[in-house]
Amino acid sequence: MAANQDHLLDFVLQLADNSMIIGQRNAEWCGHGPILEQDIALTNITLDLIGEARSLYQYAASLKGNNATEDSMAFLRDARAYRNVLLTEQPNNDWGFTIVRQFLFDAFHYYSLQALCNSKDTQLKAIAEKSLKEVTYHFKWSSEWVIRLGDGTDISHNKIQSAIDALWDFTHEMFLPSQAEQTLADEGIAPDLSPIKTNWNKKVSEVLTMATIQIPEQTFAQKGGKQGIHSEYLDYILTDMQYLQRSYPGLDW
C-alpha cells in the first residue's frame, strides 16, 4: 500500500477498535444490568457500537486487500495490532464505573463523528453520518446517568467520583494524534483533534458540574493504545472475543 493508504488503514482501525472494544466490554453487562430497562438500553448501545465497528472493519479489509475480511480484521489480529485507546479496555468494575467510562468515551465519540461528517473520504463520511444518529442517544443516556448517580445518594456520588478519579488519566490519550491522524487531518480526511478536545472539555465540565462531581487534576497521561501498547486487560478481552474464530477458522460474522 502507498504511505497515505497505510495511514488511512491505521486510522480506520483506530475507529473500529475503539467501538469494538468498548462494545465488547459493555456486552459483559448483558443480563446483569441493575434493572431490565437499563440492561436492554446498554445492550442496544453495545449492538450500535459493534455495528459501527463492523462497517469500519469492512472498509479496513478493502484497504488492506490480500483476502482480508471484516472477520479477519476483528478476530485474527493480536493485541499489539489493535489501535483502540486505553480507556475503552478498562474493566467494568461496577455500574457507576461503566457509566463514567461510557460517558467519557461518548463525548469524544460524538464530537469526532460530527467532524468526520465533513471528511473528504466518502466512505468514512457515510459511516459517520449513520453512526452519529445512534451515538447522539448514547451520549444523552450516559450523561443523564452520570448526573443521576453523581447528584444522588452519598454512595452513588462516591462511586461516580471514584470512577472519574480512576479514569481521568486515560482521557488525554484520545486527543493525542497518532501519525496517521496528523497526516490525514492535513488532507481533510481525519478531524483536527483540537476543536474536538475543546468541545469535549466544555460538555464534560457541564455534565460533571450538574452531577456535583469534581474534575481531578491531570497528574499523568496514560497512553500507548493508538500505537498498539495496551494494558493486560485487552488480552483477556480478545481471548473471549476471538475464541470461536480461532477455534473454528473460517466462520462468518
Image (cartoon, rainbow, N blue to C red):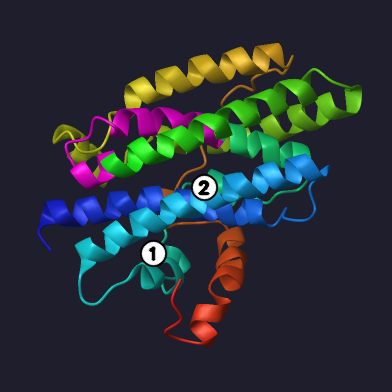
Residue 200 x %, y %: 47, 22
Residue 156: image quadrant is top right
Q: CA distance from mark 1 to mark 2?
A: 23 Å
Give above or below for 132 relative to 46.
above
Q: Which residues are magenta?
A: 105-125
Q: Label for residue 252?
A: none
Amino acid type indicated by mark 2: Asp
Closer to us: 180 or 137:
137
The residue at the point 80 percent across, 45 percent down is 36
- The answer to whether 123 appears left or right of 203 in the picture is left
Nearer to me, 55 or 82: 55
As drawn, 90 above or below 113: below
Residue at position x 53%, y 17% in the image: 203
What residue is rendered at 52% in x and 41% in y? 222
What element does badge 2 sit on?
helix
**What is the chief secondary structure element of the magenta stretch?**
helix
Q: Position of residue 196 (x, y in %)?
A: 38, 24
**Lower position in the chain sequence, tag 1 or tag 2:** 2
Mark 1 Cα shell of 10 Å, populated few (<14), some (14-19), many (≥20): some
* Left or right of 92 on screen, residue 90: left
Q: Point out residue 192 in the picture as x, y percentages from the top left corner.
A: 28, 28
Q: Residue at x 16, y 36 (%)?
A: 120
Identify the mark at residue 81; answer none if there is no mark.
1
Determine whether the residue tagged by mark 1 lies in a helix, strand or loop: helix
- Judging by the rendered image, the residue that carries numbered circle 2 is 48
